[in-house]
Amino acid sequence: MSEHIVEINESNAQAQLIDESFKRPVLIDFWADWCSPCKALMPMMEKLADEYQGAFLLAKVNADEQQMIAGQFGVRSLPTVMLIKDGQPVDGFTGAQAEPQIREFLSKHLPKSWDLQLRQAGGLMEQGEYAEALPLLLQACKDSGEQADIAIMLAKVLLELNRLGDAEAILAKIKMADQNQEYQNLMSRLELARQAGKAPEVEALEAQYRENPEDREIAFLLAVQYSQNNYYEEALSLLYDILRLNLNFKDGKAKKTYTDVLAVLGKGDPLAVEYQRKMYTLLY
């Protein structure tokens, strides 16, 4: 018996069936030893309870031994499965079901895998911690199949981090039917950010670099400015070109700046993954 599965009797019924249902859904499986369909259904239910890792509690009730509990829930045939939320039955089924049907049944009532990531990301965004929210939203967007509202939330964070190209790429995938007012607002912000241009320090170094593309000192200074102004892809690209020629450029400062940018991006960021891989090829 795992921590996600419990045997029900009169002593724990209130706590496990009712009280627990205010914390998470409780799936009650009424069964009996003589019931062949029950014995076919039970292993699948236990497997899913472990797989969902506590998203719901599987409560097993032997209807022969716990007739009072079965009677209170109006059980008339076996197996009977009921889903309890906030102290009340909200759904259920009778008879043995195939695993795909049980999964479909559960999907109607259980949180999606990305719901927790969205809640965490939303809390971080409220505190202005956009860099910390980014990897959560990247994963949520991927897991949800790039669900429009999540993609828009991701684009907002990318804009806050001044990653205009990444934000534009995300917004470009939003279908017309999902281009709501928030989408329009983000598109306007993107256009204004592009018109605003870069900081004078960045533009000055870019001009110097265009005139002296082989000057690694200028390239390094520009990469530092890029990193400080959240132009992470541009910074990494310049630093990678420097490190390809001299892995110990400026006594290791270029390499440290490169790894610092990767750390700011975080392990889940696709840009960090790409440039971490590139660094690995240089080192090994």
Image (tube, helix red, strand yellow):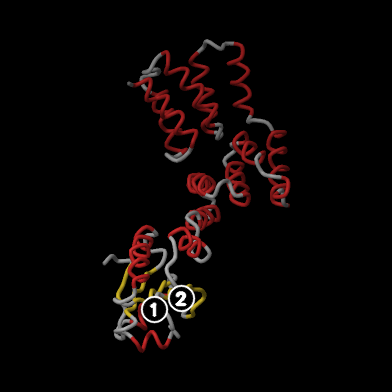
Q: Residue at x 73, y 43 (%)?
A: 188
Q: Which residue is mark 2?
A: 84
Name the element at disc 1.
Answer: helix
Name the element at disc 2.
Answer: strand
Against 96, residue 195 (above or below) is above
**Horizontal and vertical percent position of residue 119:** 51, 58
**Horizontal and vertical percent position of residue 92:** 48, 73
Left or right, residue 93 beside residue 20: right
The disc labelled 1 sits on which kind of residue? Leu
Against 190, residue 107 (above or below) is below
Looking at the rendering, which quadrant does residue 10 occupy? bottom left
Which numbered marker is on residue 17? Answer: 1
**Horizontal and vertical percent position of residue 189:** 70, 42
Q: Nearer the viewer, residue 138 or 68?
A: 68
Q: Residue at x 32, y 21 (%)?
A: 284
The disc labelled 2 sits on which kind of residue? Ile
Mark 2 crowdedness (10 Å alpha carbons): few <14, some 14-19, many ≥20: many
Q: Are marks 1 and 2 in contact (CB under 8 Å)?
A: yes
